[in-house]
Amino acid sequence: MHIPDGYLSPATCAVLYASSAPFWYVALRRLKRWLSTRLIPLLSVFAAFSFLVMMINLPLPGGTTGHALGVAIATIVLGPWASILALSIALLIQALFFGDGGITTLGANCFNMAIVGSLVAYFVYRLLAGRAAITSSRRIVAAALAGYTAINASAFCAAVEFGIQPLLFKDASGAPLYAPYPLSIAIPAMMIGHLSFAGLAEMVLSGGVVAYFQRANPSLLELTAPGATRGDEKPPHRVSQGAWSAVRPLWIALGLLLALTPLGILAGGAAWGEWRARDFSQAAARRRIAAASRNLAPPPQAPQGLERLYSVWTAPFPQYAPAFVRRPALGYLLSAMFGSGIIILIFLIVSSLFARGRGPREADSMKSHTGEG
Amino acid sequence: MNFVERTLSSLVNAMERALYAEELAKSDGLLQRLDPRVKVIGILTLVVASAVAHRLWVMGVIFAVAVTLAVMSRVPFGILAKRVWVAILMFTGVIALPAPFLVPGREVWRLPGLDWPVTAQGLASACYLVARVETAATLSVLLILCTPWSHVLKALRVLGVPVVFVVTLGMTYRYILLLLQTAHDMFESRRSRMVGKLEGPERRRVAASSAGVLMSKTLQLSGDVYSAMLSRGFRGEVYVLDDFQTSKIDWIMLAVFVVLASGGFYFGL
């Protein structure tokens, strides 16, 4: 995925250098504040590691081997900002001294792999790992999927950069000046390889290294696992105040979404494919179905299977409008509250069942492993 | 070859390339004699000129300049051919191969047997891509092969790269060589202990654990380096000795680079 010189126009390269610059600046500022004089040795040695990890040949299922970028594992151990800088330095060294990746395209390579890769890996890992214990197998799965998603997000960015070249940069005869293939070819061509082999290599490395650290050195996983326990310790007592502050944004977002549900009334007609059996016999409804289906006339009668199954279940609030409510907006709101309430209730029951099986745990404080190095 | 041997081979190749570049940078040739700042500016402007060019002949001229510089700097043709020209043909050439058939335009020929149309625009776009990549890569490799890495890094300061980055890059390069050796030793010792074949999941576990061990060693090394720096009086400020001196030939070559790159911009657009 290291884009060599000549594949991207100078204008694209300039835009991607400019897009990367704010991330480098913010990362440097944050790390300087955090690491102070420790910054230079940590970054330089870790950039050297990032360079080396790309050389390790990973055995993949099916008998082949592949190379990984190591972006997810760098992010999980160092955090996204240090990972952005360490990978960018490794990419610069690769371009300058080993001819892997171009000099004019360095900004693009850093943007795709170091910046997008690190940030995607971080968010996917945090989202999937949640507050699972450090030694939980959920973290291995989260790391593997973070690596897989990150490498594919990077490849997708590179594919889009390739794909826009023939649209924007042509000579007088119309011949593309840089990467010649449009998005319709560039995206599948890049993604097939990354969704399979490269993604798999990244998955094996990220999941495997996290599994190794869980056995050998769990403290290295603590930086991106705030609030997680070691696994061999007891879980924290839920303090209602702390629990509320942690999920408060979610409750506020849920409240807002509930309040906005009447907006659904603004959309006219039925959603495509969500037709009732009787719509097939009504002229007005048939016209709407045909208009939404590229003027293909619907069958003269409702399909037999649809007609048979349609009457199996009759919803208590059909069309999000309980029979006793006259105003549709109020009906939407009540339906939303009722639906969300049932879902929350189910989750409360399930979580109380799980909690009974586990017992209380205690929170572990996060500590910085880099200072111990 | 199993994955341990393949990894060993990549590590040894990287070490060889780094050491070869150091050796060649010491030899007596035109580019080796130039001030690194002139080289960095000159070669980068030629790379940009080749990236901007909209005409094939302009790229051809810049490529010819790169080959002339290689001859005058005693860079063996075999190295350039193997490491750059053939390697790029194998990669970019394969990527460009379908372009004559896929890029829409004026049909100039039909592939016998398959009856696929070949377009003039497709042929031109494939040539643009290969010529541009070959030219830029030849120039970049010349910079790498004819300049000691520490000089390239110091010369980056003229491009406005902050001193903290220059120092970090220098240390990174040094520790790449050290960690290459460490990784090589790790995989060599693993190979020497292996008899028979490992199953797939075990192979993956070994590879991932090796990466994990290397990462733990890296963090340990970072702590050791930091302690060593502190014990030598490091307080966060970094200084770089700028010991470059320009001579007459540097100014002449700078003028040559500027004229060539300006010509490239003028005729290429």
Image (spheres, rainbow, N blue to C red):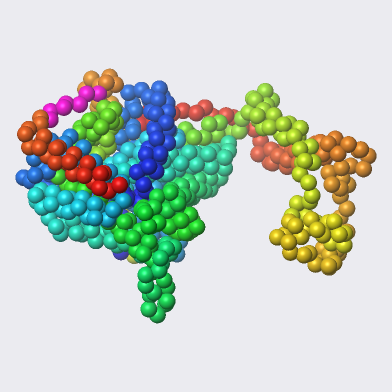
Tell me if B63 is positioned left or right of B72 in this view: right
Query: What type of secondary structure mainly makes up the magenta span?
Result: loop
| In this view, B56 is above or below A298 | above
Which residue is painted at 25% across and 32% down in the image? Answer: B159
Tell me if B107 is positioned left or right of B244 in this view: right
Query: Could you say which is closer to the camera, residue A199 or residue A372?
Result: A199
Q: Quadrant of residue A258?
A: top right
Q: How many marks?
A: 0
Can residue B199 be seen in the rendering of this structure?
no
Query: Could you say which is closer to the camera, residue A147 or residue B73?
Result: B73
Residue A209, percent from left and from top: 43, 46
Which residue is painted at 73% across and 56% down in the image? Answer: A292
Query: Could you say which is closer to the camera, residue A166 or residue A335?
Result: A166
Residue pushed farthest bottom? B113
| In this view, B155 is above or below A71 | above
Q: Quadrant of residue A335?
A: top right
Residue B261, percent from left and from top: 21, 43
Q: Is residue B121 magenta?
A: no
Which residue is painted at 79% across and 41% down in the image? Answer: A265
Magenta residues span B238-244
Residue A29, percent from left and from top: 40, 25
Residue pushed farthest front? A172
The quarter of the rendered structure image containing the N terminus of chain B is bottom left
Q: Is residue B239 magenta?
A: yes
Which residue is painted at 69% across and 38% down in the image? Answer: A355
Residue B123, percent from left and from top: 34, 63
Can residue A117 be seen in the rendering of this structure?
yes
Residue pushed farthest right? A324
Tell me if A74 is positioned left or right of B141 in this view: right
